[in-house]
Image: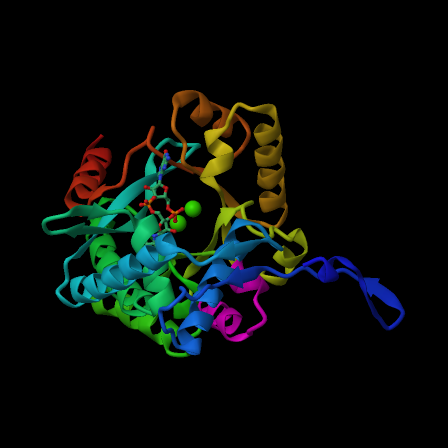
Amino acid sequence: RTAWADPVVVDGRSVHVSASTGVALARPGVPVAGSDLLREADIAMYRAKERRLGGFEIFDDDMRGAIGERLAMASALRRAISERLLTLDYQPIIDLRTGRICAAEALSRWDQPGSGPVAPDAFIPVAEDTGLIVPLGAWALREACAHAATWQRYGEIDVRVNVSPRQLYRPEYPDEVLASLAQVGLPPRRLGLEITEHVLVGEAAGPREALARLSSLGVSLLLDDFGTGYSALGYLHRFPYLESLKIDRSFIGRLPAPGDAAIITAVIAIGHAFGMAVVAEGVADRDQLDWLRDSNCDLAQGYVIGRPMPAAALLELLRRQADA
Ligand code: C2E
Ligand code: CA
Ligand code: CA
């Protein structure tokens, strides 16, 4: 690590490199395969990377336990998907100008019989690592389209579905989206796919081609969690098909802190300059809602409007809204 601290000269320029290090130790007297030791060091290295670029971690019993838990979760999740034990909740999204629900986001829920609900923040990453996100995502899309088809009698209500990069790498993905829509007769413009910027800045062109095709078919594309990743603003003009920016809930949650207010104001201006609608998520109280409306934010989603709820509860809300 001391050696890496010195710059390397490449073509006459001095370049700094950093390296994250994982360490694994054999126990005295316990024989261990070299490949196992390397795998453990690899896992420790990824942990080091997560914590702080350029740091180091030593493989320990905590990491061993975490791997066991992840494997157990992956096999339980595989079963839950094939036995159709997952459900979708829907969180309403309002148009800030009218105050009316105009869309809802589908959020996957997993209630494990015997041990209770598992948070999406716990099982979605496992699904992504293991590839289970492909069948999970396909199921969520079909289910969400079917529910959204029933909303249309109460007005033009959009459904938003989260899409993970791994799904977009599959060339057949756009056709699967079309099939899910056609099966229930939902017009493509009623569907919005929420993507993260990793898809846009990644090296591979496949996902971007899939997005361009989906957009040409009329499906809306939204950039989720805006402000948390690279947010390299220069890439926005290369993706004219993005319909909305969703400001990450961490910024909204700190409102009315002046720094966050400034960021949100700027994001709204950037979004509008690119012809995009701006959505605020994680809106937790009335003051935040009023501030966002006064700041020309277009749409809002959060606990103050409604928590994620079962499909039947959302349908009831829509029915009452249509009657009012
Ligand atoms: P997300 O896409 O950012 O979804 C919004 C999250 O914010 C949801 O968490 C929602 O319950 C939460 N939320 C909404 N309003 C508020 C609020 O006012 N305050 C606070 N503190 N939180 C609020 P949830 O349901 O736990 O989902 C977590 C993440 O899991 C989602 O974040 C999304 O990235 C992922 N996810 C969920 N379902 C799916 C899915 O079907 N496919 C994929 N690929 N990802 C999913
Ligand atoms: Ca989302
Ligand atoms: Ca989000």
Q: Which region shows up in magenta?
A: 197-217
Q: Quadrant of residue 266?
A: top right
Assess whether residue 162 is covered by the magenta stretch.
no
Residue drawn at x 86%, y 66% is 13
Of 236 and 95, nearer the camera is: 236
Q: Is residue 190 left or right of residue 203?
A: left
Whether residue 267 is visible: yes
Q: Quadrant of residue 182?
A: bottom left
Dominant SS of magenta comes to helix
Residue drawn at x 56%, y 55% is 56
Where's the N terminus, which quadrant?
A: bottom right
Answer above or below: position of 170 versus 268. below
Q: Is residue 61 left or right of residue 186?
A: right
Of 274 and 172, nearer the camera is: 172
Answer above or below: position of 94 versus 65. above
Residue 98, x across and y down, in percent: 39, 32
Answer above or below: position of 320 versus 277. above
Residue 296, x across and y down, in percent: 54, 33
Q: Is residue 252 left or right of residue 138?
A: right
Assess whether residue 205 is covered by the magenta stretch.
yes
Residue drawn at x 55%, y 63% is 200
Residue 26, x across and y down, in percent: 43, 66
